[in-house]
Image (cartoon, helix red, strand yellow):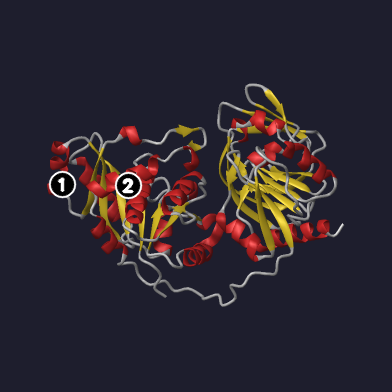
Amino acid sequence: MNPVPRIVIAGTHSGCGKTTIASGIMAALTRRGLKVQPFKVGPDFIDPSHHTRICERISRNLDPFMMGEKGCIDTFIRATEGADIAVIEGVMGMFDGVDGTDIASTAHIARILKAPVVLVVDAKGMSRSVHALIDGYMRYDPTLLFKGVILNRIGSIRHRSMIEPSLTIPSFGFIPRKDELAVESRHLGLRMAHESAGMGEFGKIIEETCNLDALLDAARLASPLIVAINTDESGSQVQSKIGIAFDPAFCFYYQDNLDLLKKSGAELVFFSPIAGPLPEVDAVYLGGGYPELHLPALESSRCRRDLKNAADSGMPVYAECGGLMYLTEKIRSDTSHRMCGILPASSEMTPRIQALGYVKGEGTGNHAFFPSGQTVTGHEFHYSRLHPSCDARYALRLRRGKGIDGEKDGLISQHVLGCYTHAYFTPAFVHALIESSVRFSKR
């Protein structure tokens, strides 16, 4: 099978400019009238929000640790239907994977998708040394289809003239320093797309300084993919309504998770815990995000009381990270603010990072969502800690990751479950959530 042309935008290291350049390429190609399907390697939520805004197509995560290789290919095939080109932004340095391995690295995805690679090189402070760096990346894994480089943060015409004549691989562009277009960061990464349009603005710079025609030609060199065609793409009949919290406080969701819910028979009803009441639904899914930036609004919102009443009546509720914190008694940042009071714990923001990395665990059997022995994979990243009650019960026993207490995750109360883990949903989990919502709807 020969899906759409595709290109991987890799980087020599974190901070080399690949996010800005990948987003600029997406914007420039979109301005040409192409339907660009964006992807992000790894578990990140923030970069895909910028991709989605630029391309007006939902950006998807590609993560072999959470999804498996087949899962990455399946997501790629489904998401690129109707697209003219796929632009895949890498993660960290080109070869940086889990625990110093190649797993879930940008290179891993490039091999899985048989995709040509363009390497972003930060040339600040270098001239001839750039060539040694590029040569090392090209030689390190000869199975990859390196097609060229983009030199970032070029200081002047003279700087470019010191590099360009000795290049042994095509250059798709020389990007001048544009610090004024940088997107501001906060503790979990860049600001979300609804807070800044800076990434899209970089498309004009790409148009002026990059050879987009050559980039498109490189993308068309992608080899065919051998995939198993799923002939049953029809979704299940709607069985229940699941409320999805979606606003500036709760905005971290893997699109594959939402798609699987819909395909499995859930009607998704989006609502804002900040601004409105809890809608008429049979279950609730609270994603992660930035509740700490909206504490007064969350405390005063009617939704906080509605959710407590719904949970007390037996409604299933599943929450991750920021959603988990919202379900506790209170969140303390500079001051304390009352939250839903559903889970037996309090939350506290901390000046230092508490957890960052992949998570793998198995169900303890204490909650229907995660039966005993069921495997869960995901990711955690937070600057907060929980203080659970001494008799707290947990749904997950971790083999990797920190969770709530260093060994366990998934705080339980009635039919409510809150995890620090941002999980990549399995059909078994989704089936359990929908079944619980159906039972609740029939009460």
Farthest residue in the front direction?
276
Rendered image quadrant of residue 332 = top right
Amino acid residing under circle 1 = Glu
Q: Element under label 2?
A: helix
Mark 1 is surrounded, within 10 Å at the Cα level, by few (under 14), some (14 to 19) or many (20 or more) other residues, namely some
Q: Quadrant of residue 68?
A: bottom right
Residue 104 lies, with reference to residue 192, above or below; the image says below
Query: Tags 2 and 1 in contact by the CB under 8 Å rule?
Result: no
* Residue 188 as seen in the image, left or right of residue 33: right
233 relative to 8, above or below: below
**Left or right: 245 in relation to 231:** right
Q: Residue 28's mark?
A: none
Say which of 396 and 261 sits in front.
261
Distance between the alpha carbons at the discs numbered 2 and 1:
23 Å
Asked whether residue 25 appears in the rendered view, the answer is: yes
Residue at 71% across / 35% down in the picture?
301
Q: Position of residue 250 (x, y in %)?
A: 61, 42
| Residue at the spot of label 2 | 203
Foreground residue among 235 and 418: 235
Amino acid type assigned to the residue bearing label 2 in the image: Gly
Q: Residue furthest right?
A: 443
Residue 107 appears at what percent x and percent y? 39, 56
Give the crowd class for mark 2: few <14, some 14-19, many >=20 residues within 10 Å: many
Residue at (68% x, 37% y) in the render: 325
Q: Quadrant of the C terminus?
A: bottom right
- Camera-nearest label, 2 or 1: 2
Q: Residue at x 63, y 65 (%)?
A: 263
Which residue is drawn at the image coordinates 74% and 60% (left, top)?
A: 240
- Which residue is under mark 1? 164
Across and down, in percent, residue 190 comes to 46, 38
Q: State the SS at label 1.
A: helix
